[in-house]
Amino acid sequence: MNSNKLSERLLAAAAFVRQGSVIADVGSDHAYLPIYLCNLGKIRRAVASDINEGPVARAMINVGGAGLSKKITVLRAAGLCGIEKYSPDDIVICGMGGELIRDIIADATWTKNRKIRLILQPMTHAEKLRAFLLEEGYTIIGESLVKEDKIYQIISAEYTGESEAYSPVELIFGRKNIIADTPVFREYAAYVKGVYETRRRGKLLSGGNAEEEESLLLEIDRILKG
C-alpha cells in the first residue's frame, strides 16, 4: 500500500471525513490516510500522530516525500494527548482495539464537542466501543462494514449529549449496518453466529449457563431471516 492507494479499510474510513476539514489521524503509522486526503483536496490540513518513534519517523519521511510538510504535522503523542491544540474537526482512529479506542476518547473529554466528528475502526470489541459512545452522549451517525483480509467495522460518531439505548445485537453489529443489510453484513453476521454457537456449546458441555449466547443467537437468526 502507498499514499496514493489506500487499503479498503482506510478508504471506508476516509469516506466519513468531511470536505474541507482539519483531521487528526491517531496511530497514523505511515501517514497514508492524511497524505491521500490532502492529495484528494478533501482536507485543509492534518496532524498525524503515533505513540512509537518508528511509525513517526516513517510518517515524516512519507509526508516530506509527498511535499506536504506544510499541510501535515507529524508528532509523537499518546492517544489524543496534546492533539486539541491543532483544533481538529474530524478525528480518525483506525487499527486499534475497541477498548483502547474507548480509553483514548475517555481521556480526551474535549472531544465532547458538537463540531467534532469521530471516525473509528476498532479491530476488536466494537460492542464495547459502541456502548461507551452511547453512554457518554455521542450519537452514532454512520457505520459501514468493509471486507479486506477480513471484515472490518467503521463507526462515525458526533457528540450530542443525548444517550441512546442499543440492544446487545445492535452493539455487536451496529444498528445502521443491520438496517443496511448488505451482503458483507450477512457474511459477518453468519461469522459471528458461528462464534456464539461455539461459545454456547462450550458452556453447555462444561455445565455452564448459555442463556446469553442463546438469546443472541435467536436475535441473529431473526435478523438474518429478515
Image (cartoon, grey):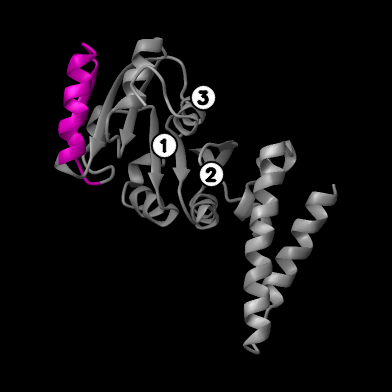
Q: Nearer the viewer, mark 1 or mark 3?
A: 3
| Residue 144 in picture, x, y percent from top left | 59, 36
Q: Which mark is residue 150?
A: 2
Q: Amino acid at mark 3?
A: Ala
Quick one: 100 or 217, which is closer to the camera? 217
Instruction: Compute the Cα span from label 2 to label 3.
Output: 19 Å
- What residue range appears in magenta? 54-78
Q: Amino acid at mark 2?
A: Lys
Q: Which of the two labelled residues, at mark 1 and mark 3, occupies the earlier sequence position?
A: 3
| Circle 2 residues within 10 Å: few <14, some 14–19, many ≥20 | few
Quick one: 110 or 6, which is closer to the camera? 6
Quick one: 174 or 221, which is closer to the camera? 221
Q: Which residue is mark 1?
A: 113
Q: Which of the two labelled residues, at mark 2 and mark 3, occupies the earlier sequence position?
A: 3
Q: Which of the two labelled residues, at mark 1 and mark 2, occupies the earlier sequence position?
A: 1
Relative to 73, say whether 161 is above or below: below
Secondary structure category for the residue under label 2: loop
Marker count (numbered) = 3
Q: Nearer the viewer, mark 1 or mark 2?
A: 2
Mark yes or no: residue 189 visible. yes
- Residue drawn at x 22%, y 46% is 78
| Circle 3 residues within 10 Å: few <14, some 14–19, many ≥20 | few
Relative to 35, say whether 74 is above or below: below
Q: Amino acid at mark 1?
A: Asn
Q: Which residue is mark 3?
A: 15
Do labels 1 and 2 touch, CB within 8 Å? Answer: no
Secondary structure category for the residue under label 1: loop
Queried whether the magenta region covers residue 45, the answer comes back as no
